Image: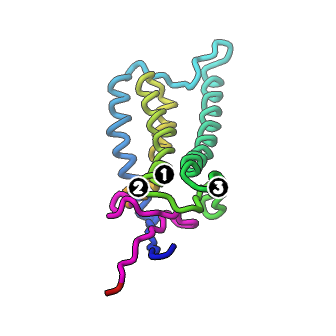
Amino acid sequence: MRGLIKEKRTIDLNDVSRFSTNIFLLAILIFTLPFFLIWYGHITYFIFSSIDEVSFVVNLLINIFVFLVLLFVGIILHELLHGGIWALFTKRGIKSIHIGMIKYPFFAPYCHCKEPLLIKHYILGAISPAFFLGVVPLIYAFVYGNLFIHIYGLFFFIAAAGDFMVVKLLLKEKNRNALVLDHPSELGYFIFIYKKPEE
């Protein structure tokens, strides 16, 4: 891009670990504490209602299995939400999105956008998993008193700690109309800044 310089902005994974602890404590304060205060003594412990034909233990195991399946699906959806939102603002659509797997050491899926985006569009895609997989289930659990759904939402809210850190970094950028390019292998991005003409 002519007249632009590319600067790298990345986040240390050790900082993410510390930030995750802060996010966890914040989530407990905002979501979990009110949840137990309101629903104490009336909490629903299952995703599904108790099945009369089976014992409590079997019913519990069924619910745990379903919960783990939903957790796995949620991990995939986390990346698909990133990519789906970003694709809306790229010239090549879904062709600009790459979803892969980090094989070592985490064996975790990741999503990478190969086109530069406006900061506001990048933020929208970055924050979407935290909202749809974290906040929405937490609100649902708060309304209906479901502990399983509460734990599910809490997990994905905390799992978005890295996304929150990237958004926090983006909000510090002076030029909100700047273009940002998702970093292909590190947590962070490249930002394109107009180069000042030499005097």
Q: In the image as oriented, which residue stretches furthest toward the top? A: 52
Gap in angstroms between the C-alphas marked 3 and 2: 20 Å
Q: Which residues are magenta?
A: 170-197
Coordinates of residue 24 in the picture (x, y in percent): 39, 46
Residue 167: assigned label:
2
Badge 1 or badge 3: first in the primary sequence: 3
Disc 1 to disc 2, C-alpha distance: 7 Å
Towards the viewer: 42 or 174: 174
Determine which quarter of the picture holds residue 18.
bottom left
- Which of the two labelled residues, at mark 3 and mark 2, occupies the earlier sequence position? 3
Element type at mark 3: strand
Q: Are marks 1 and 2 in contact (CB under 8 Å)?
A: yes
Q: Which mark is residue 166?
A: none
| Residue at x-position 58% and y-position 51% | 87
What is the total number of numbered labels drawn onto the structure image?
A: 3
Question: In this rendering, is residue 28 above or below 11?
Answer: above
Category of crowding for the residue at label 1, using alpha-carbon neighbours closer than 10 angstroms: few (below 14), some (14–19), many (at least 20): many
What kind of element bears circle 2?
helix
Q: Position of residue 47 (x, y in %)?
A: 56, 26
What amino acid type is highlighted by mark number 1? Ala
Q: Residue 198: image x %, image y %?
A: 35, 85
Q: SS of the residue at dot 1?
A: helix
Query: Which of 88/69 is in front?
Result: 88
Tell me the tag on residue 126: 1
